[in-house]
Image: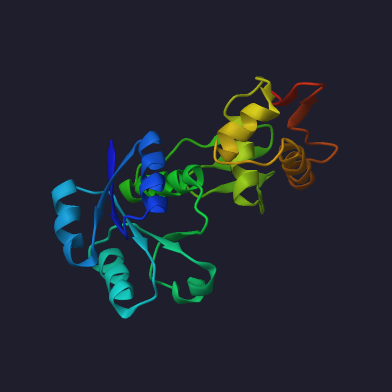
Amino acid sequence: MQKVVVVAKQTDEMVKLCAELNKHGYQCAFTDSNDAMESITENNAGLLLIEFTGTPEVETLCRYFRKEKDLPVIALVSTDKLDKLVDLVDDFAVKPYNSKELATRIKHLIRKDSDVPTAQIRTAGITIDPDKYEVYVDGKLVSLTFKEYELLKFLASHPGRVFTRDTLLNQVWSQDYFGGDRTVDVHIRRLRSKIEDPDHVYIETVRNIGYRFIRN
């Protein structure tokens, strides 16, 4: 299990978040800023997850581990402090935190740091690059939101298989999501408008059931 060092107060919110990350395969170890180095060494951590307060101490810690120790750093941050993150961290998550999305971001950074390329998904004019979070249609880069990308990647990873809206909500939005299944329809519609045209059709609606990625 990959280990993550967490520099944050052990509030109920943070303890719950770490418990959810554990379900995704990441073992979290809490520490404070003074003992971060010792904890990272002791746990052989692959990533630093830090509650970004915007104080000089926290900024120095982010800069040190990211630049000097070449350790991926993700900030947990409120929207009012986003402007202070420039060049300090590799990625960030904004409150309220979504454990599935955060786990995906952690996986991306740890994989990127290991320099082990992930196989691209290619089919009939579309290319999905998991390492770069990029999608190309006929060689042209398509701009997708994070959820649109995750939805497309999940469907394309299981070509021909039909998924209900509830399953897609669980797999892409996680069990923490409390919205209705109409969210899936909205994202599918937006995704189609970005990747499909009369010559490129990738996602099929299965009446009264859900959606599937068409085998090509």
Does residue 67 sit above or below 122 in this rendering?
Answer: below
Q: What colour scheme does the image use? A: rainbow
**Residue that lies at the very extreme toward the bottom in this rendered image:** 56
Q: Nearer the viewer, residue 16 or 188?
A: 16
Using the rendered image of the protein, determine whether residue 202 is visible from the camera's viewpoint: yes
| Image quadrant in which the C terminus is located | top right
Residue 102 appears left or right of 63: right
Outermost residue toward the front in this view: 12
- Seen in the picture, residue 198 relative to 97 is either above or below; the reply is above
Residue 200, percent from left and from top? 78, 36
Q: Residue at x 69, y 24 (%)?
A: 164
Which sits in the foreground, 26 or 18? 18
- Residue 68, by quadrant, is bottom left
Residue 129 drawn at (x, y percent): 53, 43
Residue 52 % position (x, y): 39, 67
- Residue located 33% across and 74% down the image: 59
The number of numbered discs placed on residues in the rendered structure image is 0
Residue 122 visible in rendering = no
List x then y, in percent, for residue 26: 33, 40
Q: Nearer the viewer, residue 193 or 128?
A: 193
Residue at 17 percent across and 54 percent down: it is 39
Considering the image in quadrants, where does the N terminus appear?
Answer: top left
Tell me the residue at 35%/77% (across/down): 55
- Drawn side of residue 211 relative to residue 64, left or right: right
